[in-house]
Image: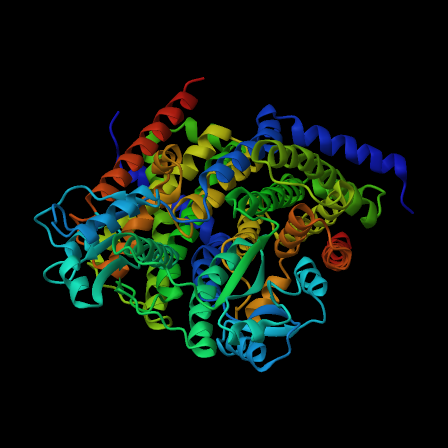
Amino acid sequence: MSFVWSRAKAIAQKEIYHVIRDPFALALSIGLPIFLVIVFGFAIEFNVKNIHLAVHDADQTQASRGLIDIFGKSEYFIIDKVTSPEKAQQAIMSNNDRAALIIPGGFEKLLFTGKSSQVQLLLDGSDNSTVVPILSYLESIQKMANKQLANFNPSENIDIKTRFLFNAELNSRWFVIPGLTVAIMAILSVLLTALTVAQEWENGSMELLLSTPVQPLEVIVGKLVPYAFFCLVAVVFVYIISRTVFGIPFRGNIFVFGLGCVLFLVTCLVQGLLISILTRSQSLAYQIANMTGLLPAQLLSGFIFPVESMPKFFQYFTMLLPARWFMVIARESYLKGSTFFDLGIPFLALGTLCWFMIFFAVKKFKKDLEP
Amino acid sequence: MISLPLLRGFFRKEFKQAVRDPRMKFVLFIAPIIQLILFGVAISADVKNIRLWAEPDSKDYVLRHIYEHSIASQWFLPAVDNRNIEPFELLRSGKIDAALISPPGGLNRALGRGTADLQLLIDATNVIQAQSVELYIKDITASVVAQDLKLQPQNPPINFSMRVLFNPYLQTAYFMVPGVMCMLMCIVSVVLTSMSITREKERGTFEMLISAPISATEVILGKTIPYVIISMCDMPLILAAAVFLFGVPLRGSLLILMLASLAFVCSTVAIGTLISTFAKNQQQAMLGGFLFLFPANMFSGLMFPLENMPMVMKWLSYLDPLSHYLALLRNIMLKGNEIHFIAFHIGVLILMAIGFVYISFKRFRTTLQ
């Protein structure tokens, strides 16, 4: 039997009624991405400032105060004075401070006699999100301290002129928001369809559907189209917000980006359907949707942790995730202005994943039709 | 007013129902361990495998040394040979991540005349990666120049002797594993609880429960305690994987860790219950769960620093049980529990649990009448 549009349309219509009767799902599927993008667009800032620094000054001289001043004026650190080195360590232990500066007695004397003097810095190594930025700040602070306090300014033989392309000011938002859109849509679209088929099994309406002449592909297309439409609406809103509220540039081709969106959303929606078809139980479908959608989309898609830094095996493994490919398309379209040909590999990969998902969904569905 | 045999009946039914499906057993007890291993191994906090480009076949030996040292450092990978394409174009089309460009005439000659300008182009679409690349190249260049020009590196008068406490070698597993642990515990418990009560509502068996001679307190306890217990069963499994497979230390006390986990699971089960009082069907419960889980993971403190968010966002993150639990896990496992800190955050988690259970209780009461 062949694919009949009118039957797919009938399924789609039923699905739309279903959603309209329960506007909660509709409101969430469009409102949630917008809400989350706004909240996290404002919240996320990778350039850490106002780090609490415990300071113990055993020297109490002009030089030691000068050094503390350099830390305090750098706008990276907030100085918390403590009375002993043990108290400094204790402050890190109790999470009151992220780092400690311990200046030994005789600091100024050593400095004026031209000998090299040591100050101790303790960093809290339990929190990855702050320790790495602090390490990089310390280098420039050390340089500044040497220049200002000891007049030590070695000439650099090679002066490295760095140009950060595509995001010259290293704006965290430009980096986060396109990626955030992908991470949100990746899990939301899987969730939207993950229950649809399982629901029909649990309600018993699947038996009814099976007795009609409707084909598996028609059911899948019918269930897909309305949700794809809602998700697209959400993406359009998020796009408008990212351009107007956050002022993120969009340098690529809007049609290429749109095509990527459609391909990506369809792939994720079919992934949800496939889970639903395979599990036939709503609570199980939900757990599996979260397992294959939520954490992979947040942690393995290259959203914050770059895919290139993963071990080889896992780099290949992430190729199975639609979000990983759309992450490339979204970021490069926004910031780099890549053309369709630059993005050939991600598009090819997304297309292949999409085809496979639909193929398996139809095949598994077919099996169900036979008793 | 609470009858114990009645509660026992509740527990027996919930346990049976939760693990009746063997696939559910897999999802509840095996999948979290697989996920912990997967994310623990895969995600690395430092940046590696950056594709670096420098002018090929250049007679400029200083540039070549910098390039070779970069590749040897294992942070960089050599870019595929593209000699006829401009470096900017290579960056734009995503074939390389960074490019070194020497001044006209080469670095050798420029160095002979004094200070040389070396241009470094970095693809900054990933801000974190871009910053690390700049630091790496600066370090490598400084050491190469000292070697090539036979310069004695001058000792600066002020030295910072840095010591990273609790994780001296900045091992990624120490950072990531506690984070992934708390995300997994959170997902399992919220999903399990919110779906279970909503399913009864959807099927109509909840009405039956209401008409039975049981108090609202008993319903709430009978429906939440089993899920606290099931979720807590995951804790030893995940913890064992973290300690034995990844070598994450457990410097604090196991008892305190279990107490903190219990407080955390109570708070997430309470949130799951609250979601189910709002949801009319399982789809709504699921979307409600997403509304909680996605921001909760983001605000946990694993993905980005919570330090300098705007005040409003900071308050939002204080409402996130994950942010407290991750701070607790890090403090107990890596630092070896600092008792005031632990007591405070466990207290916050318990307060949250009580608060959410109380609201759910109120809402159930209104349904019951």
Q: Is residue A259 left or right of residue B58?
A: right
Q: Nearer the viewer, residue A369 or A227?
A: A227
Q: Is residue A187 left or right of residue A55?
A: left
* Residue B24 position (above or below residue B189): above
Quarter where residue A153 is shown: bottom left
Whether residue A214 can be seen here = no
- Residue plotted at (35% across, 69% down): A154
Q: Whole-percent x and y of residue A49?
A: 50, 70
Q: Is residue B8 left or right of residue A147?
A: right
- Residue plotted at (27% across, 58% down): B122
Residue at far left of view:
B84
Q: Whole-percent x and y of residue A208?
A: 46, 30
Q: Nearer the viewer, residue A259 or A154?
A: A154
Q: Nearer the viewer, residue A107 or B84?
A: A107
* Residue A292 position (above or below residue A334): above
The quarter in which the N terminus of chain A is drawn is top left
Quarter where residue B128 is shown: bottom left
Number of residue marks: 0
Residue at far top of view:
A371
The quarter in which the C terminus of chain A is drawn is top left
- Residue plotted at (22% across, 39% down): A348
Residue at far right of view:
B1
Instruction: Say how the picture is coloured.
Output: rainbow
Q: Whole-percent x and y of residue A115?
A: 50, 68
Whether residue B143 can be seen here = yes
Q: Whole-percent x and y of residue A264?
A: 32, 46
Residue at far bottom of view:
A62
